[in-house]
Amino acid sequence: MSHRFQKIIFLLVIFAAFLLPPFFVFAQETATSTEEGSQATPQEERQALEDELKQLEEQIAQYDEDITKTAQQKNTLQNQISLLTKKISQLNLQISQSNVMIKDLSLQINDTEGSIDQTNLKILDSRSKLSSILQIIYEEDQKSLVEMLLSEKELSDFFDNLMALEALNAKSQEFLQDIKNLKSSLEIQKQSLDQNKSDLESVVKLKALQKQESETTKKEQNSYLKLTETQYQASLQKKTEAEKRAAEIRARIFELIGVPEAPTFGEALDIAKYVESVTGVRPAFLLAVLTQESNIGKNVGQCFLKDPKTGDGVVAYNGKEVSRVMKPSRDVGPFLTITQELGRDPYNTPVSCPMSYGYGGAMGPAQFIPSTWMLYKDKAAGITGKAADPWNIKDAFLAAALYLADYGATKQTYNAEWKAAMIYFSGSTNTAYRFYGDSVMKITAQYESDIKELEGT
């Protein structure tokens, strides 16, 4: 390498040393500005979350469909396996029954074979005796008439002897024929027993094959059931994860729109005890009412008012239009006053959505409608020394207790509290809504038990 070339390289290195730092600074600043520029606004974040929530809700619906379908497949497979189990049990009984019959037939065949053997012996004996008789008859036949007459003392003895031999011959022939008939009958009987035994053995083989086939099918069905159960559990797991993520997104959306975080039961109990010292309303009863209304601050409304003239609005987390969010003639005016006093945006402050009947528009953990809140906000402010906020947990608890106290809840009897709960819900004790009062009192009893256990009393 020449000296001149080395010098050129040296100059390039020096030039790069001066040029690169500013370039790196510029690149870093560009990256930083890009990151800063990529930060989403609350509105953009909320829109992104709402889009993701919509997708999750669609996924959850699909998981529900898959779970239902898989559950049906599980039931079908379980029913098929149950039927196969019963069929296998039935085949086992039939095989056992056939085996018993085969065993019985084998014994009968053995007995018949024994009888045939004995009959054969009788036939052989009879043939031997018959042969002797025939030999005697033959010998007698060979004698001349003179010899036979001379051998007998009397003529009658000759004829008696001859007749006896003929009779014995006839009897022997008859006896031999009976034995042959017996042997033939026994052989036919044995053949029939052999055939029955063979038929039963074929039946047993067939049943055994059916049992083997059923057991194979059952094994396959069990394998499918295990796979189906795995799919079922996987779908449940995915649904649980999607629901958990959806709950996180809703919580974040409500955080972005200014919904306060719900208290724990212990925190709510502390607030309820403080409120009891001011109003005389039992903590367990107050917590039961607020549980019925908003699950103690967890469900504080999922709609926004959008049109003050009609009272229509939208669902907070997906923007779907909803009518009857608030009654215009009764609650829109007070609501605009309340949000203005608290510095809230009335069109981005959550209120309850309407049910299948009536209007929505209830505010905060205690679910006061705006017109009713106007009656109690000053009372609450007089106790706390600050402007009452229906979305504030402590203010909501206090105002709810003041309302319940006005309708007799301070008596702390079942009937008094039930009546106050009914009025809180519908403004009357109409028995058409008694489900509400009954539910509140049931929750009250449970909370009273929980509080005693929590406090060790």
Image (cartoon, rainbow, N blue to C red):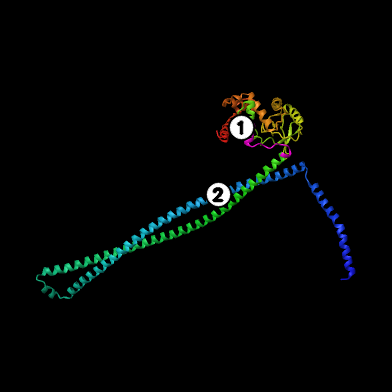
Label 1 environment density (alpha carbons within 10 Å; few <14, some 14–19, many ≥20): many
Which dot, 2 or 1, sits closer to the camera? 1
Instruction: Identify the image quadrant of residue 275.
Output: top right
Give coordinates of residue 360: x percent, y percent.
69, 32
Q: In this view of the protein, which residue sits in the foreground, 365 or 213?
A: 365
Give coordinates of residue 193: x percent, y percent.
36, 61
Indicate the secondary structure of the residue bearing disc 1: helix
Q: Are marks 2 and 1 in contact (CB under 8 Å)?
A: no
Three-letter amino acid code at disc 1? Ala
Q: Any magenta on residue 287?
A: no
Three-letter amino acid code at disc 2? Thr
Specify whether 310 is left or right of 268.
Answer: right
Identify whether 41 is placed above or below 5: above
- Which is nearer the N-term, disc 2 or disc 1? 2
Looking at the image, which residue is at 39% across and 60% down? Answer: 197
**Residue behind mark 2:** 76
**Residue 367 in view:** no
Specify whether 315 is left or right of 76.
Answer: right
In three-dimensional space, the C-alpha distance between marks 2 and 1, rounded to whole angstroms, equals 43 Å
Tell me the tag on residue 236: none
Instruction: Identify the image quadrant of residue 7.
Output: bottom right
Give coordinates of residue 363: x percent, y percent.
70, 32
Q: Any magenta on residue 259?
A: yes
**Residue behind mark 1:** 288
Residues drawn in magenta: 255-272
Identify whether 375 is placed above or below 110: above
Q: In this view of the protein, which residue sits in the foreground, 56 or 153?
A: 56
